[in-house]
Amino acid sequence: MRTYDIIRKKRDGGELSEAEIKAFIDGYVSGEIPDYQAAALCMAIYFRGMSVEETTALTFAIRDSGERLDFSDIEGLRVDKHSTGGVGDKTSLIVAPIVATLGVKVAKMSGRGLGHTGGTIDKLESIEGFCTDLPIAKFKKIVNEVGIAIVGQNASLAPADKLLYALRDVTATVDSLPLIVSSIMGKKLAADDDCIVLDVKTGSGSFMKTLDDSRKLAELMVAIGKRAGKKMRALITDMDRPLGNAIGNSLEVVEAIETLRGKGPADLVELCVALAAHILCLADKGSYEECEKAAREAIASGKALKTLADMVEAQGGNKEWIYNPENFPKAKYSFAVKAKTDGYITGVDTEGYGVASLLLGAGRNTKDDEIDMAAGIYLCTKTGDFVHCGDTLAWLYSEKESAFAAAEKRLLEATRISDVAPEKKPLILDIFE
Ligand code: URA
């Protein structure tokens, strides 16, 4: 079938066959199919959607577009945890050391910040000397010896996603369910893990803004993972509030360290313990209650913090920074954002908080931008708190004093304050398995 005919079939609402999808992806990666035809197909998929069969075929074609990793020389059960992207989401830095401490192997490939959301690789690079680009043999050696290693996405893995993602980013086709599912799962399935736990974010700070869409996303990713022979679980978690108090790279690493020291903010602790317990359950380490207890003990005993420090050392980082987080460089300037009125914080536009953090220098506006590792936001108040006019809502940090005015404006616009206390909303909204 001609490329033209494949595009036309999807444009007219037809169902593509597995062979047509594979031919398209292979042709795009080899350079035979140009960007403009791939962009046209993405737009057709955006408007017409895809059946479960088509989405599965697209995921497998993306998975098979490059190298498939072989982790069979990593001893024991291998797990991965993946978040669909949020604001203040430093859970991987906490959950991965907890479960590795308790005997499951974490061979993790993570991403960089995307849009208003942060990325684990950028956060880890705020630790002096930490290397996120290791040869695969060294990566596996560290997983075997320490139980955990976290590196950036290998360039030879799922190259179709790399090309498609860049194209979707500039053609307004990111927020399409089949395209998100195939992008995330295509990459995950190219790695060789036994169990995958997904943290599907929902709400204003995530790519999926409604609970309904997030449920569809979770259900589909779990189904496709199972078809590929993986043990799967997905939690839907609230991103109508930033997670924890810190937003920004080194600020988030320090908050992760504090959490592993037993001094984390309540929402972050709740989610990390739940994610760790679900991973451990999936890895047959006991009942949910037993796994939850074990996760809390891994924090209380200091063992999970040691696992993080050992991983940092094995990947070339300065482990003293993990035991003494005051070593992380501080931003040159700070600024207190004050409440302009009395009242309850009834809700926030989390994406606005993410954008304020970008304005301070914590993320990239173009793909070549340098990140200011110490830039970001520390929240002194969260949804549900009562504030008085003049109370500090948050501290802003940056190397650029000139960035404060725009970031303050964005943060204040994103914070709703009213006389009536809001209803408490659970953090974990649903679970799919
Ligand atoms: N993360 C990805 O890797 N891909 C998407 O499409 C969205 C979030």
Image: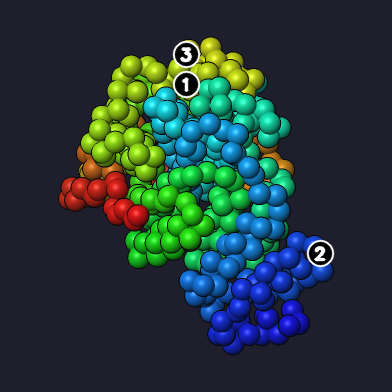
Q: Which residue is label 3 attached to?
A: 323
From the viewer's perspective, tell me whether residue 234 is left or right of residue 133: left
Is 293 situated above or below 359? above
Q: Which residue is label 1 attached to?
A: 307
CA separation in Å, label 3 and label 2? 49 Å
Q: Quadrant of the N terminus?
A: bottom right
Is 13 situated above or below 164? below
Asked if ligand 1 lies within 8 A of label 2, the reply is: no
Which amino acid, mark 1?
A: Thr
Question: Within the image, what quadrant is residue 120 found in?
Answer: top right
CA separation in Å, label 1 and label 2? 43 Å
From the viewer's perspective, tell me whether residue 240 is left or right of residue 109: left
* Mark 3: few/some/many CA within 10 Å (<14, 14-19, 20+): some
Where disc 2 sits, the SS reads loop
Q: Mark 1 near mark 2, Cβ–Cβ under 8 Å?
A: no
Which amino acid, mark 2?
A: Gly
* Mark 2: few/some/many CA within 10 Å (<14, 14-19, 20+): few
Asked whether residue 250 is in view, the answer is no
Q: Return the x and y of residue 195 as percentages of the image width and height.
A: 45, 45
From the viewer's perspective, tell me whether residue 185 is left or right of residue 67: left
Q: Return the x and y of residue 163 as percentages of the image width and height.
A: 70, 58
Which amino acid, mark 3?
A: Tyr
Q: Return the x and y of residue 111 as percentages of the image width and height.
A: 59, 43
Where disc 1 sits, the SS reads helix
Q: Residue at x 35, y 55 (%)?
A: 433
Q: Which residue is label 2 attached to?
A: 31
Where disc 3 sits, the SS reads helix
